[in-house]
Amino acid sequence: MTQKVLISSCLLGEKVRYNGSHCLIRHPVVKEWQRQNLIVAFCPEVAGGLPIPRPAAEIWGGTGKKVWEGEAEVITKPSVGTNANDAVTQDVIVTQSFKTGAEQCLALVHQHQIKLAILKAKSPSCGSEAIYDGSFSGQLRAGEGVTTALLVKYGVKVFSELQLEQAYEYWLGL
Ligand code: SF4
């Protein structure tokens, strides 16, 4: 078995999240893939040119699939000043950076002939089952992030870090 596995960089301990943190997973399945040198790490938001740290972003108007269809946008969280002299920051549309990072991820997938990805749950890029709904209120909606939507379209099976046993079973069958 030599099938490589794409994994969100933040799940491997890289400090690439919007707030400069990581979310390292310590799991025997990941350790096994690491032992066999089969992991390809990638962070689409950083690849798309976004800085660390960066404002939190959510998809407004739908899911990753809708972003690719031009019916939804990725926006950053607006901040509102606490008094009249404070600047009020409007939403910033960052859709293009998200799409650029996703396209780079797809190129990497093709380069390594990857068929399986473990991507961070709930992220506007990497989420697979649910993502935040664009209201910045902690509400989730069913659906996938921008990168996940593109990878799925091109036949990659995507699991989250919460589904590693299922992912390993899938990998064994590749
Ligand atoms: Fe990067 Fe995806 Fe992790 Fe966000 S969830 S930090 S886009 S790898």
Image (cartoon, rainbow, N blue to C red):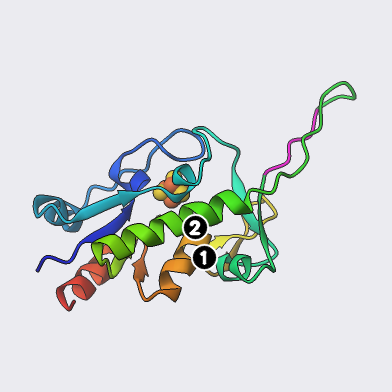
Q: Is residue 86 above or below residue 92?
A: above
Identify the element where label 2 is drawn.
loop
Local crowd size for mark 1, using a 10 Å CA cut-off: few (<14), some (14–19), many (≥20) = some
- Quarter holding the C terminus is bottom left
Side of 49 where 88 appears, left or right: right
Q: Amino acid at mark 1?
A: Ala
Q: Is 35 within the magenta?
A: no
Quarter assignment of residue 111 = bottom left
Give the x, y percent position of residue 6.
29, 58
Q: Which residue is mark 1?
A: 130
Residue 126 visible to an observer of this rendering: no
Q: Which of 25 and 18 lies nearest the eye of the viewer? A: 18
- Quarter holding the N terminus is bottom left
Q: Which residue range is magenta in the image? A: 77-81
Q: Amino acid at mark 2?
A: Lys
Q: Which residue is mark 2?
A: 122
